[in-house]
Amino acid sequence: MKPIRVLLPVLAALLLSSGAAFADNGALKKVDGILVNAAGMTVYTFDKDVADSGKSACNGPCAGLWPPVAAGAAQPAAPYSTIMRDDGSRQLAYNGKPVYLYAADRKPGERSGDNFKNVWHVVKD
């Protein structure tokens, strides 16, 4: 049997490649004028992200509070696109800006991250 310290990196790689370490990979939809994921959780953008840059400014501990919405393997149709995150995973973007969930939102429809520190905003459509 292999020591756990040898298996942990393998397990971490499997989780990252499956998207399990990030938000639900389901399609986004409009509910009451805002975008939500398949589970009904509110989707946000971050003012520090530059549209169409292909980058996220929210990495490390930031991504723990604001989980990136993982992108599936297929290329989405406009206005959706994908970006490559610093860790090599793919993140869904809306109108060129990466999208996130807010870890403090516990139930579908909650919007407690809207205007958080004046840089996080609900995606309105």
Image: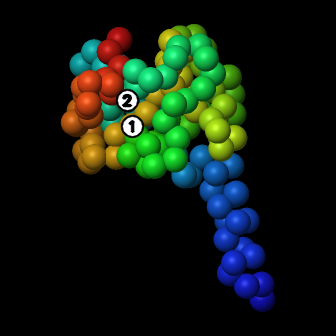
Specify the farthest residue to the bottom: 1
Label tally:
2
Image quadrant occupied by the N terminus: bottom right
- Determine whether, in the image, residue 26 is placed left or right of residue 42: right
State the scheme by which the image is colored. Answer: rainbow
Residue 12 image offset from top left, x and y in percent:
65, 61
Marks 1 and 2, the one that precedes in the sequence = 2
- Determine whether, in the image, residue 40 is placed left or right of residue 20: left
- Say if mark 1 contacts mark 2, CB within 8 Å: yes
Could you tell me which residue is drawn at 59 percent across and 13 percent down? 52
Q: Crowding near pointer 1: few (<14 within 10 Å), some, many (20+)?
A: many
Viewer-nearest residue: 25 or 85: 85
| Residue at numbered disc 2 | 43
Residue 31 image offset from top left, x and y in percent:
29, 22
Q: Is residue 122 above or below residue 59?
A: above
Q: Answer with the quarter of the image where residue 96 lies.
A: top right
**SS at circle 1:** loop
| Residue at numbered disc 1 | 101
Q: Crowding near pointer 2: few (<14 within 10 Å), some, many (20+)?
A: many
Q: Is residue 22 above or below residue 14?
A: above
- Determine whether, in the image, residue 46 is placed left or right of residue 95: left
Could you tell me which residue is drawn at 61 percent across and 17 percent down? 53
Could you tell me which residue is drawn at 24 percent across and 19 percent down? 32
Kind of residue sitting beneath label 2: Val
Could you tell me which residue is drawn at 26 percent across and 30 percent down? 117
